[in-house]
Image (spheres, rainbow, N blue to C red):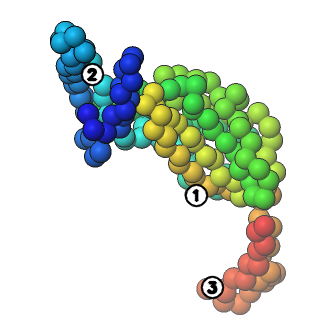
Amino acid sequence: TASFARSDSGAKGTLAGPLADGRHDVQIALSDRAGNDGTGSGWFVVYTVGPQATIVAPAPNGVFKDATPGVEVTFADPGGSGVDLATVHVFLIRDPDPPVDVTSMLTSAPDRLAGDLTSVLSAGTYRLRLVVSDRATNTTTVEGGFEIVTVAPSLAVTSPHGFVAVATPTFTIPYHDD
């Protein structure tokens, strides 16, 4: 009781050392000034592990020609307090612009969000950020980058050209890819 502050109506305090993850039972015994004994009990669960979170699509570090890529993210909290679905958010990031919350563009299921981005993305490099919290307020954030390339490479065969006198000609093919 030395680490607890007592008052006429109760006590409040914090333990000196950390508790391990898992269930903890509390039993309290006290006596009032007249010598009457009272007891109480309760329990709580310490859970310090954040939920699992994965960006499935667009594949991290992928390069895509579709300017409205499909998005799929998954999340779970096995053995924990469970994912708080109200905290699940997916952000689209293109530096130097601020993140844009695209969660409302996706269809929700108990363990995933999926759908197509409804706004057309211009060519460039993007990141998706998935933020998920569990009911114990542990938060996990993951990011994955991808690139949109909407212009096909330009190329030409500059040699050989016309008639050639060898059966194993050397080819020259310059190309340009933005």
Quarter of the image with the N terminus is: top left
Distance from Cα at disc 3 to Cα at disc 1:
42 Å
Q: Which of marks 1 and 2 precedes in the sequence?
A: 2
Distance from Cα at disc 3 to Cα at disc 2:
85 Å
Front residue of 65 and 72? 72
Quarter of the image with the C terminus is: bottom right
Q: Amino acid at mark 2?
A: Trp
Distance from Cα at disc 2 to Cα at disc 1:
45 Å
Tell me if 10 is positioned left or right of 89 in this view.
left
Residue 54: give x, y in percent of width and height. Answer: 48, 43
Which label was assigned to residue 43?
2
Residue highlighted by disc 3: 167
Q: How packed is label 2: few (under 14 Cα within 10 Å), some, or many (20 or more)?
A: few
Residue highlighted by disc 1: 61
Examine the rendered structure and indicate whether residue 23 appears above or below residue 50: above
Residue 112: give x, y in percent of width and height. Answer: 51, 29
Regarding mark 3 in the picture, which secondary structure is present there? loop
